[in-house]
Image: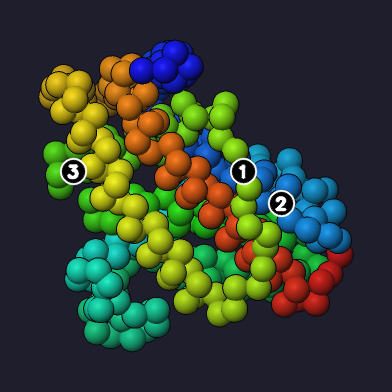
Amino acid sequence: MQRSGLKRAVYICIVLLLIGEDFLYSWGALGHRLITGMAVDYSRGEYRAALMRHRNYLIDHSMDADHRKETDPNESVRHFVDLDRYGPFPFNEFSLDFRILSRKLGEQRVKKNGVLLWAIEESYRNLVRAFEKHDPQAIRRYLSDVAHYVADLHQPLHTTENYDGQLSGQEGIHYRFEYELVSSLLPVISFSPDPPQDLGSVLPSLYQFALDSYVCVDDILRADQRAVEQLKINRKEYERTKGEKRKPYPVPYYALLEKELGLLLKERMNKAVFALSSLWMMAWQAAGRPSF
């Protein structure tokens, strides 16, 4: 095991024991803040100059959508889409038309399966209208919402029914991947996303992003299982009861996970930055390139 990887793994274990899991949401606050900030930094031209004036606000409010879960009972389903509830890949039961899908399967079932794609589309449309109305408060709100939901879409475990490994005996993988691994790699994560571009139709583009995320699910689960088997970890020792903080896995586990999934995580975060900066740019252009 490389010394630098071991040192970072020790660091993250200490951090997790100190702050606990209550601090965390999807991608973790660290991941959301990082993706949002990089999407501003990798924007281009006149549009980038405008975004830079709001950079600190957007980063600070990149978690607003998660915080709304505490007061809005309809918010939670806006943060995931369980594609594998629509049959095996490539999910032939799925439709991008929410009304058609609801008539076919029932609206409650569709909502239970997660409405992340439509939450992004709705927030995108709201952002276009906010730009058109020159409403600075609404602009900043929907820039932040699009940022959060797009980041969620690029977290592979937000696209599967087995989102926390609960169906495969790997409980806690959601947390270990999206926060512990991000925190461990934070000092060395590099960004080189493609420049923002017009993606064309929004929903089909979002669906392709979702598929790209979904195909990474098995890689994450396999890496976790290999690390557990190699280190002979007894998962039962790390189970928690309601109200308890989750005990971090042993230090070497995180170093193995970093080796197995480091490139995948960096790729997912770079793709999130590209998608987010592109959607922001498209909304601004669709509204006539207003000052903001």
Q: Between 49 and 251, which is closer to the camera in this rendering?
A: 251
Quadrant position of the C terminus in the picture: bottom right
Q: CA distance from mark 2 to mark 1?
A: 9 Å
Residue 46 appears in the figure: yes
Q: Earlier in the sequence, mark 1 or mark 3?
A: 3
Q: CA distance from mark 2 to mark 3?
A: 37 Å
Q: Provide the secondary structure element on which disc 1 rests.
A: loop
Quadrant position of the N terminus in the picture: top left
Kindly identify the residue that appears in the image at 33 percent across and 27 percent down: 256
Kindly identify the residue that appears in the image at 34 percent across and 52 percent down: 216
Dot 2, how many residues are within 10 Å of its Cα: few (below 14), some (14-19), or many (20+)?
some
- In this view, 120 is above or below 9: below
- Judged from this view, the residue extending furthest toward the front is 2
Give, as a three-letter code, the residue at label 3. Answer: Gln
Q: CA distance from mark 1 to mark 3?
A: 32 Å
Give, as a three-letter code, the residue at label 2. Answer: Tyr
Q: Which residue is mark 3?
A: 166
Residue 99 in percent (x, y) is at 37, 84
Quarter of the image for residue 34 reads top right
- Numbered mark located on residue 42 in the image: 2
In front: mark 1 or mark 3? 1
In front: mark 2 or mark 3? 2
- Numbered mark located on residue 191 in the image: 1
Give, as a three-letter code, the residue at label 1. Answer: Phe
